[in-house]
Amino acid sequence: MFDAVKVKNECVEWIRGFFEENGKGCNAIVGISGGKDSSIVAALCAEALGRERVIGVLMPCGEQHDIDMAKLLVEHLGIRHYIVNIKDAVDGLTASLPFELSAQSKTNMPPRIRMTTLYAVAQSHNGRVANTCNLSEDWVGYSTRYGDAAGDFSPCANLTVQEMKAIGRVLGLPAVLVDKVPIDGLCGKTDEENLGFTYAELDRYIREGVIEDAAKKERIDELHRRNLFKLQLMPSFKPEF
């Protein structure tokens, strides 16, 4: 029932409307990882604003084995891009801390430094930072708060992985980008290895409420419950006057 052409066109118009209201004439700044999500968001922005108003930022941390996919994307779209290696920043911050970082901190530091980099590019190039998360990842908290979960506008936050792939094909992106096995880029495992279920299973559960495996349902529900805070505004105290 998903009409990829219709949704793609509506998303393009939504991006145009966002920039008309929140940054007329500004550029879209997109962190390019080489995966489907950043590829699709960059392509949507290029169609909405024109490729001359999209800037891709490639941010390896040392050696990135699949950076050729990111380069393929920026060449395919014909957009301006910068390559900023964040390894020195990560190493410098790690070395300056007077304590041993936890494993979780080590995992989440690079995406937060990448977001700092994107805002540095944006504020120096009259830009707005694109969030590249999708509904499936957000549903189970598969993002770093104030890292890849941040941004100024989010074109695909309400689209599942399967829906994203359909839009990627409509956009004419190379199949190698649309169908690339998602790897979190943090610990070296695929998303699905880390999660314990496939995106196809998750997407069906989100859209139809159907999942055959009770253990997987329980895990999805628990991840969703545990990570809802990432999708909500920061709690704030409201004094009574």
Image: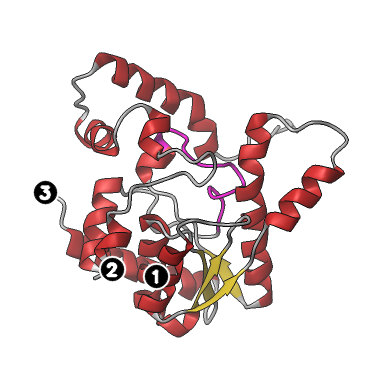
Residue at figure coordinates x 63%, y 67% from the top left:
84
Residue at the bottom extreme of this rendering: 52
- Where residue 30 is drawn, which disc sits there? none
- Where residue 73 is drawn, which disc sits there? 1
Residue at figure coordinates x 61%, y 63% from the top left:
118
Ranked by sequence position, the earlier of labels 1 and 3 is 3
Taking 121 as reference, is 114 above or below it?
above
Q: Is 53 included in the stretch rendered in magenta? A: no
Type of the residue with mark 2: Leu
Q: How far apart are marks 1 and 3 (CA)?
A: 29 Å
Residue at figure coordinates x 63%, y 56% from the top left:
62
Instruction: Identify the element where label 2 is drawn.
Output: loop
Ranked by sequence position, the earlier of labels 2 and 3 is 3
Residue 97 in picture, x, y percent from top left: 84, 40
Where is mark 3, residue-wise? 1
| Residue range corresponding to the magenta coloring | 139-151
Type of the residue with mark 3: Met
Instruction: Identify the element where label 3 is drawn.
Output: loop
- The main secondary structure of the magenta stretch is loop
Taking 180 as reference, is 202 above or below it?
above
User: Mark 2 and mark 1 in contact (Cβ < 8 Å)?
Assistant: yes
Type of the residue with mark 1: Leu
Residue 148 in picture, x, y percent from top left: 54, 50
Where is mark 2, residue-wise? 173
- Is 197 on the left or on the right of 188, as rendered? left
